[in-house]
Structures are given as structure tokens and as C-alpha cells.
Amino acid sequence: MAKKGKGQQKRRVEFRKNRTQKVRQADITKQFNRDEFDADKAVSRERISGKGELTRKRTIVGHEEATDDDPDNFTVHVDKDACLQGRVLRVQGLVSEVEAPDKSVYQCATRRLLKTMSTDVRHVVAAGDHVWFRPSGEREGIIESVGPRYGVLSRTSRGRQHVIVANVDQLIIVSSAGEPGLKPNLIDRYLVTAESAGIRPIICINKVDLVDPVQLQTIVGVYGGMGYDVHLVSAIEETGIDRLRQSLIGKDTVLSGQSGVGKSSLLNAIEPGLNLRVNAVSRENDKGKHTTTTATLIPLATEGHVIDTPGIRQFQLWDIIPEEVAGLFRDIRPLVNHCRFPNCTHTHEADCAVKDAVADGILDTRRYESYCQIHAGDAA
Ligand SMILES: Nc1nc2c(ncn2[C@@H]2O[C@H](COP(=O)(O)OP(=O)(O)OP(=O)(O)O)[C@@H](O)[C@H]2O)c(=O)[nH]1
Ligand SMILES: [Zn+2]
């Protein structure tokens, strides 16, 4: 018996040694491919309800390239000479506010044919959509076609995907170095949400004037090492603001983070008056019935928009199932294929490459703990 036990132990040690080698060879950082956030892919993720499986699927509603006689594939012919291209700034009931190329805003209804195509999305038109619309009357129009979507923030209600905002380029995760103190686990939650939606996350640590920069080295190292952009800024002292402002140009950006971290102060520092416009929209939303879901794109002076909704500012993880979480952690994803069990949850199993990576100092312990919390569905 004792002999067999020893043999087994030896095999395990061998197995682990081989695997550690393979993992090191894989060179984790190489796999953090920024091209994933390439807008061209126009891909959104959809869950096959009940099975916990994921497929990647193009969400195309009324794609412009197609013809009327092809009703099954969500295609509509658009007379481009009579229509304008625009961007939906927000949707309120049946009316969409659409920004034309000359920046004027049209109040648009939606063509009935498009509405009948609404099968797997609750609303045919969502804030952020790229549309073709036919102008009519005084700054009014009809939306004729909706372009493919990427970077979709959505939630599922009663088995249907409810798009809150589409075509978001990036999510700025705002946290603060002090008052309130840094909460890396909360940053991890936002990262998981962004990764799941295919939106490029940017980590912004505000109020660096309150701490010794040395205190932030570890966290900057961990996230920077994974390929994330990390900005250390102070809205009050205006440090790092120029670089942050640059990253917003020509992009559609959602800003989120806990209350009090300085989101409003940062918006003020980036562009005077921007925060006032955001606040005006928030106040207006508060009056409406759909407080948590009415997203609004607010144009920036330098092209691009910031997107604000009270619901998105402090949003929680949406629609993420436990089995998905490891794949959304950039530092854990390359390890999972090396676990002994294909359905390893990386929490209690033997011969788990993720746990071994923590023990070997390859994976940051705090990140692993964060994974365990999110996997267990614990609140931040
Ligand atoms: N020391 C320091 N304080 C800051 C900085 N930025 C903002 N603050 C202060 O932090 C507090 C909160 O700032 P806000 O900009 O209102 O924070 P917010 O994230 O918009 O908060 P909510 O509107 O509640 O979501 C205010 O008292 C600001 O003056 C900074 O860079 N350094
Ligand atoms: Zn494992």
C-alpha cells in the first residue's frame, strides 16, 4: 500500500512540474491581446438560456447592406440618397434622439418594419446605435436601419436581452487612492464586466495627491502587467488629466465607480461644463420612470461621447455565470487548460493549475481571492 501511495505522489509531482513548465512557456502576458477590443469585430455575446453555454453571435438588426426580399436575416434596404447616418443619443419611449453628422439632433420614430424584427432584443433601437434615418419635418425623422452592434452593456430580463447602451468603446473604472480608500476587488468586478461585454477597460486611480505614490506601485504593476491601461490622476491638482483627456478623444466612454471617488471632479477637469451637462441629464432621468436604464450619450468637445446613466455609474455584474468568471480574468484564463479536471472551478480541486500558480507566485494572491469571491457570487 505504502509503495503504491508513493508512486502516486511521485506521478503527481511530475505532473505538476511538467505543467508549471508549460505554463511558464506560455508566457502569460503575450496572451493579452488588445485587438480583442477591435470595434470591427462587431460581436456581442449571447447566452443560450438555461444551459450556461456561451456562443458568439453577430447582433445585426436591419443591416444596411441588405435587401428587402431577405426578411429572415434582419435586413432592410436603405435609400442612402434620402437618408442620413446618425447616432442615437438616447431613447425615450417611442422617440429616439439622433445626432446627425453636422451635430444637429433629430427626434426620430422607428420604421414599423424594423419593429417587427425585434426578436431577441427587447428594443430595436438602443442608445449608442448607429442608424440610417430619413429626415422629415422640423428636425424629425424615421429610423430606417440599425447597424451592427459591438460593446454592448445589457441585462437580461425574463430571458430577453435588454440593451442599455450599444457601441461603447471603453469603460473608465474610476477609483480613488484615498477617501474612500482603494478597493481592488471592486476594480476586478468592473474589469470582469468590461471583458464580458467586449469593452476596453481603463483603470483610473484618482486622488493620488492623498497618498505616497510608492503605495500604488504594486497595484499598478499587477494591472499594467496584464496589459490594462492604468492612469494615476488627481482631479484637484490636475495631474495626469491631459493623458486621460487624450484617451477620450473620438471614443465613446462609460465612466463608472463608487460614489465619492471623484467622477464629477474628473469630468470637470477634462472638459469644463461637461459635468454640468451630465448632471442635467441625470436629474432629468431621475424624474422618468426608467431611471436605471435610460442611458444618454453626451457629446464631447473633442469628438466622442461620455455615456452616463445613474444605473451604469455603480453597476454590478450582469449576467455573468460562475463558469464564465475564470475566462474573464486575463491572468487566470491562460492557466485553466492546465488543470487536471476540465470542469475545475479552481476553488477546491486537486491539481489545479490556478491554485498552483498562486503557490508558485505566478498569480497574484489578491487577484485569486477576488476570483473566488466573484465566482461564489459574493457582494463586493
Ligand atoms: N484630495 C482630492 N479630493 C478629490 C479629488 N477629486 C475629487 N475629490 C473630492 O472628492 C469628493 C467627491 O468628488 P465627486 O467628484 O463628487 O465624486 P463622484 O464620484 O462624482 O461622486 P458621486 O457623484 O457621489 O458618484 C469631493 O469632495 C471632491 O472635492 C482629488 O483628486 N483629490
Ligand atoms: Zn483549476
Image (cartoon, rainbow, N blue to C red):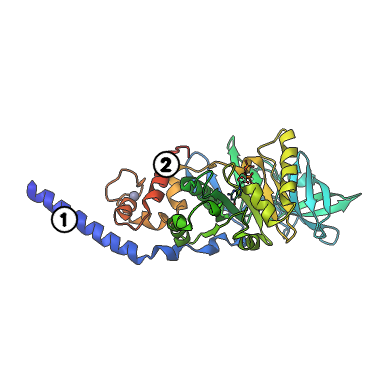
Indicate which label's residue lies in the foreground, 1 or 2: 2
Q: Which residue is mark 2?
A: 373
Q: Position of residue 173 (x, y in %)?
A: 56, 51
Whichever of labels 1 and 2 marks the residue nearer the N terminus, that label is 1
Q: Amino acid at mark 2?
A: Gln
Can residue 120 be seen at all in this image of the molecule? Answer: no
Q: Position of residue 298 (x, y in %)?
A: 73, 51
Can residue 366 be seen at all in this image of the molecule? Answer: yes
Q: Position of residue 352 (x, y in %)?
A: 31, 50
The front one of 369 and 194 is: 369
Q: Which mark is residue 343?
A: none
Mark 1, secondary structure of its residue: helix
Mark 2, secondary structure of its residue: helix
Crowding at dot 2, Cα within 10 Å, few <14 / some 14-19 / many 20+, comes out as some
Q: Is mark 1 within 8 Å of ligand 2?
A: no
Q: Amino acid at mark 1?
A: Lys
Q: What's the distance in space between the residues labelled 1 and 2, CA to CA? A: 33 Å
Vertical order, 321 against 252 (above or below): above
The front one of 77 and 375 is: 375
Vertical order, 244 against 346 (above or below): below
Q: Is residue 166 left or right of residue 135?
A: left
Q: Which residue is mark 1?
A: 10
Examine the image and state in which quarter residue 330 appears.
Answer: bottom left
Most extreme residue toward the left is 2
